[in-house]
Image (cartoon, helix red, strand yellow):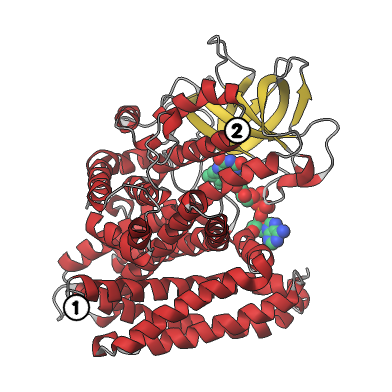
Amino acid sequence: MTYRAPVADIAFALKHAAGFKAALAEGLYGDLDEATVDAVLEQAGQFASDVIAPLNSVGDKFGTPFKDGAVTTPPGWKEAYTAWAAAGWNGVAAPAEWGGQELPHAVNAACIEMWNSGSMAFGIGPALTMAAIDALAAYGSQELKARYLGKLISGEWMGTMQLTEPQAGSDVGALRTRATRAGNGSYRITGSKIFITYGEHDLTDNIIHFVLARLPDAPPGTKGVSLFLVPKLMPDGKRNDVRAHSVEHKLGIHGSPTCTMIYGDQGGAVGFLIGEEHKGMHCMFTMMNRTRLAVGLQGVAIAELATQQALAYARERKQGAGGTIIHYPDVKRMLLTMRAATAAARAICYATAVAIDRAQRSKSEAARKAGHERASLLTPVAKAFSTDIGIEVASLGVQVHGGMGYIEETGAAQHYRDARIAAIYEGTNGIQAIDLVTRKLPLDGGGAVAAYLDELRATIKAVLAINDPTFGNTAYRLAELIGCVDRATQWLLTQKSSDAALAGATPYLRMFGTLAGGCMLAEQALAALRESGDSAARTALARFFAENIAVQAAGLERSITEGADSVSHAQTVLVE
Ligand SMILES: Cc1cc2nc3c(=O)[nH]c(=O)nc-3n(C[C@H](O)[C@H](O)[C@H](O)COP(=O)(O)OP(=O)(O)OC[C@H]3O[C@@H](n4cnc5c(N)ncnc54)[C@H](O)[C@@H]3O)c2cc1C
């Protein structure tokens, strides 16, 4: 089975579940029209299906061998990457001033999903470059932009994002990589980084590293971290003092090189400051937020791929008196769960991208602020909910295949292995949940989350109002869930950052994501009714989600508001 990009579904979700069509109609995107968007999505779907997808298992088998400091990417990858960049895909949402197309982030998000369904290991490299472009465009000096933005946007050079060190993972502020002032405006970087995605490779000649480091007089913690641009090749073509020391052997995404990087063997790598000294986390947050959404999209992407493969298998595999296994209720349940959860996660990610567009493009200050708050609220949900869904759906995909799912040649096992990393990198899902509860719920004194819940209530009311029996209990189940989310939100807001709030963060994020996804599926079904009357499949999906998945999430309320006590008493279980 090879991936076929579900372009029509993707376009429909973007326009109707994520609110892109409304934004377009409001004029948020100037004179951009729907036909142009459809054409872009169609071409992206074709490239992802025809060029990237066939390389996915090649990357898994070949990996990224490392010899004498150099990484060889899998056969066919360099050609595919070069063609991809030449077609302009790296610059879809990048600023026009530096050669990008400045299309909506929402359109780019749909493209990112497709690149990653083609191959997660392929897709993560460009996702990091795109995030680096955003950070450089926002905070870089004019000179740095002039030297680097054009080539990053064209894809001639790729970017990396370097935070992690052995003692500094989730706790970024513990990093020790040092930067000293060279006296000529540049800096010298010494130290090492681990787990650096595409830290070394042969897809492009130059690699532009975005590195967090600490100046000698820096205050401790994240407040003393600065961001530096460190090119692999200096403007005169000479090698900078940075190299890959090794490449990790890992569970999945074998085609993506994960490198240990060494800085300063010969006295220090030349680095250029981005933004202000000690304010690197601020710049890095631009990069991290973009990457968090991209990693959420990886979750959607792998879920879509696993679902397509499982459906194809279930339609063919004969077993027992029922004929093909797709007719068995338990298999149907698995497949519907896969479809519905994937669609819910997709809608959340796209809605996050629309919010980013609103934050950047809205005319009024108030609308930009509202867009920013919505993007801030949804980003951890997009990242963690979608990547959890990616893993669960990939796991169901293995299950639908029975024993064949556990055998590598089927491909289902690769999806399961590949999916696993997305819940870990770019801030673990636990850290995302804590971010949601301790930073995002209090936004605007709880006003940002309250406004969002009001919007979801309006969707539920609209489903009730339409009084269409094909929706079954959709509105009632979603109304129950929103009651649970509302109560849990109020409870968490009074807890601040107490241990009780931190213990409930992960179940809360799950419940929140399930509500948001469920309402967006309902919104999509309502739109299908309005648009063409042909809404049977979308209504059935929204109904399945509400009646089978939302009901489970409602049970999480107790875990959040009552379960914390048993977490704190778990000391008696966990002590050695
Ligand atoms: C394949 C791969 C590619 C990667 N690519 C990059 C890259 O390109 N650039 C880069 O900079 N890094 C990269 N990373 C690193 C990745 O972002 C980190 O592994 C991740 O942030 C977690 O850090 P850690 O591994 O140190 O785990 P830890 O921080 O030690 O976490 C271990 C566990 O403890 C939990 N935990 C930790 N602190 C807290 C807390 N305060 N509250 C609650 N729970 C907590 C975590 O959620 C997790 O479950 C990559 C990693 C891998 C495996």
Q: Is 477 rendered above or below residue 277?
A: below
Q: Position of residue 387 (x, y in %)?
A: 47, 59
CA separation, marks 2 and 1? 51 Å
Residue 157 seen in the current view? no
At x 38%, y 69%, the residue is: 341
Q: Amino acid at mark 1?
A: His
Q: Dot 2: few (<14), some (14–19), or many (≥20) neighbours within 10 Å?
A: many
Q: In this rendered view, identify the residue nearer to me: 566 or 51.
A: 51
Q: In this rendered view, identify the residue nearer to me: 164 or 244.
A: 164
Q: Position of residue 452 (x, y in %)?
A: 52, 72
Q: In this rendered view, identify the residue nearer to me: 73 or 34.
A: 34
The first of marks 2 and 1 along the sequence is: 2
Q: Is mark 2 within 8 Å of ligand 1?
A: no
Name the residue that disc number 1 marks: 327
Q: Is 162 rendered above or below residue 390?
A: above
Q: Is residue 557 left or right of residue 416?
A: right
Q: Is residue 184 left or right of residue 319?
A: right
Name the residue that disc number 2 marks: 210
At x 32%, y 43%, the residue is: 57
Dot in front, 2 or 1 = 2
User: Disc 2 vs disc 1: Cβ atoms closer than 8 Å?
Assistant: no
Q: Quadrant of residue 151?
A: top left
Determine the secondary structure under disc 1: helix
Q: Quadrant of residue 230?
A: top right
Q: Is mark 1 within 8 Å of ligand 1?
A: no
Determine the secondary structure under disc 2: strand
Q: Residue furthest front?
A: 364
Q: Position of residue 128 (x, y in %)?
A: 50, 39
Q: Amino acid at mark 2?
A: Phe
Q: Quadrant of residue 524?
A: bottom left
